[in-house]
Image (tube, rainbow, N blue to C red):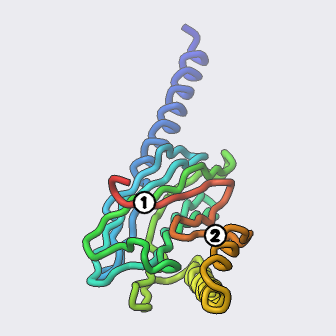
Amino acid sequence: MNKKLILGTILSLAACIVVFVKTSSLAQLIPQPTNEEGSLTILEAKCGEATATKVANMSCRIKNDSSKEVAAFTVLWTITSASDKPYKVSTTEDKSLVKSLKRLAPGDVVDCEAIGSVTTPAGDPFTKVEVSIDIVLFSDGSTTGKNLTNSLLQIQTRQNIGRYLRSQLLKIYRDQGVEALMRELSDSQINIKNNGDSTHESVQGTKGCCGPIGS
């Protein structure tokens, strides 16, 4: 057999092995949870797909390891490429707006998902995926976390809007009675985003959700 042909075949096989090892090593790096003591703990995290150019369907299981009830929290995923370019995806679970909604009690576990995908050009492959709890708002009003996503401001804004709307509805009830209140509620076009479900800030059209185990 021609020596050049043999050499070319060997080099091609070597290149395939390098690509395979690189992709396999990447999968081993995904994901890397970062936890803060006395807060929420990420028990496990995974990606439905993790290659050099695409990370998809990220999910994690979270436990309230604090001694307080949690009203809201944000999960932050950071996918970093070889050029150190970060792609960030966040999911917020907010039960602070309505007091009657079940919140995350100490010891409770919840699953969170960021459904969709994040991609990068072939020349700038992903090298690392990290997941952390960005901010936690406890029911007593105290907080913990870096709040890199500025989610706390969004949560507080929703709370303020909720208080205002409740005060106006209460005024209608007191001044005009139950029928007027029911008409206002049935005719209202007001739509408060996140009345106990999850919100999601992301890149490239991903979406997210959080829900208790077994829901």
- The percent coordinates of residue 125 (x first, y second) are 60, 50
**Residue type, numbered disc 2:** Lys
Q: Which residue is denoted by mark 1 in the rendering?
A: 211
Q: Depth check: give the residue in front, 152 or 98.
A: 98
Q: Which residue is denoted by mark 2 in the rendering?
A: 193
Question: Element type at marker 1?
Answer: strand
Q: Residue 110 lies in what quarter of the image?
A: bottom left
**Residue type, numbered disc 1:** Gly
Q: Is residue 148 above or below residue 127?
A: below
Q: Residue 102 lies in what quarter of the image?
A: bottom left
Q: Residues within 10 Å of mark 1 (few under 14, many from 20)?
A: some
Question: Element type at marker 2?
Answer: loop
Direction top: furthest residue: 1
Q: Earlier in the sequence, mark 1 or mark 2?
A: 2
Q: Residue at x 40, y 84 (%)?
A: 138
Q: Depth check: give the residue in front, 49 or 22.
A: 49
Relative horizontal placement of residue 87, taking residue 112 as reference (left or right): right
Q: Depth check: give the residue in front, 33 or 6.
A: 33
Q: Which mark is residue 126?
A: none
Q: Residue at x 59, y 58 (%)?
A: 81
- The percent coordinates of residue 150 (x first, y second) are 60, 81
- The image quadrant where one finds the N terminus is top right
- The percent coordinates of residue 126 (x first, y second) are 57, 53
- The percent coordinates of residue 147 (x first, y second) are 53, 82
Distance from Cα at disc 1 to Cα at disc 2: 17 Å
Relative horizontal placement of residue 42, taking residue 113 as reference (left or right): left
Q: Residue at x 39, y 90 (%)?
A: 140
Relative horizontal placement of residue 26, taking residue 109 as reference (left or right): right
